Image (cartoon, grey):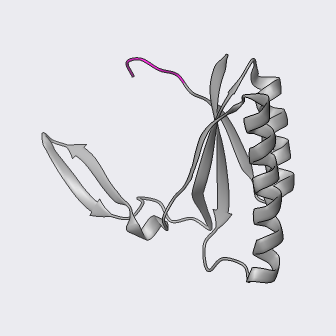
Amino acid sequence: MARYMLGIYQPAGDPPPPEILEPIMRDLEQVNEEMRAAGAWVFAAGLHDPSTATVLRAQEGEVLVTDGPFAEGKEHLGGFTIIEAPDLDAALEWGRKLARAITLPIEVRPLHFGTC
């Protein structure tokens, strides 16, 4: 089994109002439960706003520290789910289910372990 990241891209700005967000969160929990029951779910996490990020960049023997992401964008990685799946097609199917549940773009990317 391979591991995949299902990255959730969300728009910048405030979250939707409760009447929109609550049904999305219910649908998300249903997909998470389905993943758990299938043995695919490894873990999931949400991320704080990009403004809370600190970027470390090696440059000329020093490490520069800057606040926030380097690039500005209209959407950002807001969370992710790590799954185990037998192949990319199975991972894409989980990504489709997640995209339908939360109505946001999902990036499916295989993970690799070892040296970079």
Looking at this rendering, what residue extends furthest in the front direction?
37
Residue 21: quarter of image: bottom right
Residue at point 27% right, 50% down? 56
Residue at point 77% right, 45% down? 33
Residue at point 76% right, 30% down? 91
Q: Give the camera-side residue of 26 and 116.
A: 26
- In percent of width and height, residue 90 lies at 81, 26
Residue 6: quarter of image: top right
Quadrant into which the N terminus falls: top right
Q: Which residues, given as a range, are shown in magenta?
A: 112-116
Q: Main secondary structure of the magenta part?
A: loop
- Image side of residue 100 versus residue 8, left or right: right
Relative to 46, does residue 1 appear above or below in the rendering?
A: above
Q: Give the camera-side residue of 49 and 81.
A: 81
Residue at point 56% right, 27% down? 111
Q: Is residue 115 magenta?
A: yes
- Image side of residue 90 versus residue 57, left or right: right
- In percent of width and height, residue 35 lies at 76, 37
Relative to 107, does residue 71 appear above or below in the rendering?
A: below
Q: Give the camera-side residue of 41 and 79.
A: 41
